[in-house]
Image (cartoon, rainbow, N blue to C red):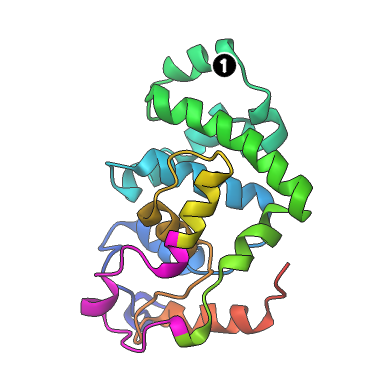
Amino acid sequence: MTETETIRCPWPGSDPLYQHYHDTEWGFPVADDTRLFEKLCLEGFQSGLSWLTILRKRENFRAAFAGFDIDRVAGFGDADIARLLADAGIVRHRGKVVSTINNARQAQALRTEFGSLAAYFWRFEPAPADRPTDLGWEHLRTLATTPASVSLSKDLKRRGFTFVGPTTCYAFMQAMGLVNDHIATCTARAAVERQRDRFVKP
């Protein structure tokens, strides 16, 4: 597919890294626990920043957090916190670092209860009737929370997760394919829908 044939949502702009993320990742359904955990953590780190800032540092985050292996991160201690706060390649925010370790431990409990993180998260996929019919940019750009993201946020907080507000949870749902918020004319929208049609919910 050539650049002239590609129609995108407006938000990636002209940045090649952002465009690639939009075209190949954002909105495609994910059932891999490591990817789900990574995204939940990185959305927490994004709070107050742009996603592009985090995306540019993603490989650094992966190296710093053991590839977001849930069990390894859950075992991090004080020495790891000190190491992470000294790592200029990531966002050095103590609260978010500590939150990531805490959330790994809560993710272990979720995995025990539901069999996988994917099985837990996909319970919050909204019904088609609860999705917007206006798929234009002017409408979709206004969506920051939904009833489903509010429910997910409340449930995660009840289970001890942190940095998981409704806006963070909705961004997570958008990115991991629990919803398809590509605009109607976006080339990726149809590709996402095809994958969603084949996707077997965990």
Residue 19 placement: quadrant: bottom left
Tag 1 residue = 80
Looking at the image, residue 172 sits to the left or right of residue 78; the answer is left
Q: Residue at x 30, y 57 (%)?
A: 15
Q: Nearer the viewer, residue 118 or 193?
A: 118
Q: Which residues are magenta?
A: 130-150
Q: Nearer the viewer, residue 150 or 139?
A: 150
Amino acid type, label 1: Asp
For mark 1, give the secondary structure: helix
Q: Nearer the viewer, residue 150 or 125?
A: 150
Q: Residue at x 51, y 17 (%)?
A: 81
Residue 14 lies, in percent from the top left, at: 26, 62
Q: Is residue 19 above or below residue 190?
A: above
Looking at the image, residue 48 sits to the left or right of residue 95; the answer is left
Q: Is residue 142 above or below residue 175?
A: below
Q: How many marks?
A: 1
Q: Residue at x 57, y 29 (%)?
A: 101
Q: Residue at x 63, y 31 (%)?
A: 66
Whether residue 145 can be seen here:
yes
Residue 164 lies, in percent from the top left, at: 45, 46
